[in-house]
């Protein structure tokens, strides 16, 4: 006969199972369905309107918005006429322009500017998120629905007088609408732009089982991951937030520990990409120095030392949209920024110490474009 402890445990396991299914089959699905419309077989995706937003003010400092719905970004803040400065900036800031530079055989100056439509929905709540809350809430609001083809029309128009060789469907969480990726890559190919434009995906890794669900229901091609992996002009920024279940939950704004299964969800999503051969670039935001080593070891257990070679830790600088959010929650922005800065400083030092021991080379010494992750 079962005791109350057994009954309670069964209840807990069942609840967690339900919560996992709820996450992939209900919550993500419901956000996804609200974020596209289908007209005569053509999907149109809800894009964020930048007009009058805190994000728009920031964009104005380094790049510009194109109308209300598109923007550009110069990833590297360095003199475009100084190749050495750009090379240094790749290591000191971001290496995304290098992915395109290698794939398209173009200079960093040519691949620095990125064209970015922004999906107006997300499934998590990172406290330091750079997007105004209403611009990722999955509600239409001032947003508008655009087809992928319309987005590439806007890119082509812009390319008439700007040097742009990179496009990124940003978010929000773009993988709530995975069709965006395949449609975008196909459309670029159809227009003869596959060798001209690198398409960069990005994800918070919270949609792996949702994608499985779409595939099992026949709503997404079973070869989705393999199809995107087959394009040479494609790579994905994979955003690991936090370095263990607890710091992950904090970094995505969840306080309920029942959502700890999202730790495995992110590895499942990442695994799906690596298994299919997608060029996946792991970034860590908001690391917990106490679990950083364990995080790298977990990744190495799955993908070998290449995981440590291909993982970069990134600093976070808050600048505006988070102000209202943090005030509402009674969180001090200065304290949060100080904690992020300190954790990053310690983690960056640790990466310089750990990576040589794990890989035999210095941290960031090998271009990540040279490292193709595989399941060990
Ligand atoms: S994953 Fe986090 S940082 Fe990215 S859009 Fe969503 S809430 Fe913002």
Image (cartoon, helix red, strand yellow):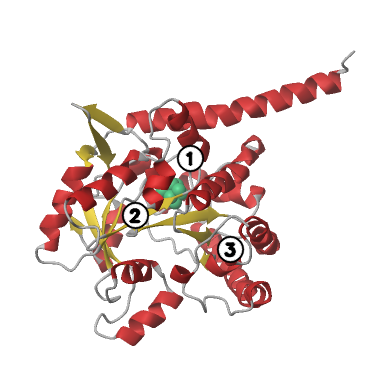
- Vertical comparison of 123 with 93: above or below: above
Q: Earlier in the sequence, mark 2 or mark 1?
A: 1
Asked if residue 319 is positioned above or below residue 172 in the image, the reply reads below
Return the residue at label 1: 207
Residue hosting label 2: 231
How many C-alpha atoms fall within 10 Å of the one at disc 1: few (<14), some, or many (≥20)?
Answer: many
Query: Could you tell me which quadrant the C terminus lies in?
Result: bottom right
Q: Is mark 3 within 8 Å of ligand 1?
A: no
Q: Secondary structure at mark 2?
A: loop
Q: Which residue, given by chain and number where applicable, does mark 3 sit on?
A: 307
What is the quadrant of residue 43 in the picture? top left
Percent position (x, y) of residue 5? 85, 23
Q: Residue at x 66, y 64 (%)?
A: 289
What SS does tag 3 mark? Answer: helix
Taking depth in this image into account, of 12 and 211 the one nearest to the observer is: 211
Real-space Cα separation, disc 2 to disc 1, in angstroms = 21 Å
User: The N terminus is located in which quarter?
Assistant: top right
| x and y, in percent, of residue 34 in the image | 34, 29
Q: Point out the frontmost of discs 3 and 1.
A: 3
């Amino acid at each position: 006969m079962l005791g109350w402890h057994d009954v309670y445990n069964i209840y807990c396991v069942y609840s967690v199972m339900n919560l996992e299914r709820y996450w992939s089959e209900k919550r993500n699905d419901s956000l996804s369905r609200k974020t596209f419309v289908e007209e005569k077989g053509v999907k149109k995706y809800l894009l964020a309107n930048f007009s009058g937003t805190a994000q728009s003010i920031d964009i104005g400092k380094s790049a510009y918005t194109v109308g209300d719905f598109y923007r550009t970004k110069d990833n590297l803040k360095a003199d475009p006429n100084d190749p050495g400065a750009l090379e240094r900036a790749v290591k000191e800031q971001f290496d995304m322009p290098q992915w395109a530079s290698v794939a398209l055989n173009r200079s960093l100056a040519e691949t620095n500017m990125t064209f970015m439509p922004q999906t107006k929905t997300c499934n998590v709540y990172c406290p330091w998120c750079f997007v105004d809350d209403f611009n990722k809430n999955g509600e239409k609001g001032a947003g508008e629905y655009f087809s992928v083809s319309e987005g590439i029309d806007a890119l082509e128009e812009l390319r008439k007088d700007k040097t742009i060789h990179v496009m990124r469907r940003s978010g929000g969480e773009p993988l709530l609408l995975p069709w965006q990726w395949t449609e975008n890559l196909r459309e670029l190919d159809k227009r003869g732009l596959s060798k001209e434009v690198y398409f960069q995906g990005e994800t918070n890794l919270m949609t792996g089982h949702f994608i499985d669900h779409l595939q099992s229901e026949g709503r997404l091609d079973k070869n989705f991951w393999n199809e995107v992996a087959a394009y040479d002009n494609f790579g994905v920024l994979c955003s690991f937030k936090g370095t263990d279940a607890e710091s992950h939950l904090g970094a995505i704004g969840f306080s309920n520990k029942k959502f700890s299964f999202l730790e495995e969800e992110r590895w499942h999503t990442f695994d799906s990409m690596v298994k299919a051969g997608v060029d996946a670039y792991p970034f860590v935001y908001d690391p917990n120095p106490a679990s950083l080593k364990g995080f790298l070891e977990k990744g190495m257990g799955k993908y070998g030392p290449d995981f440590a070679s291909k993982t970069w830790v990134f600093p976070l600088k808050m600048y505006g949209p988070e102000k209202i959010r943090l005030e509402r929650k009674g969180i001090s922005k200065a304290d949060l920024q100080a904690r992020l800065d300190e954790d990053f400083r310690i983690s960056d030092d640790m990466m310089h110490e750990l990576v040589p021991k794990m890989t035999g080379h210095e941290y960031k010494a090998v271009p990540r474009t040279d490292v193709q992750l595989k399941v060990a």
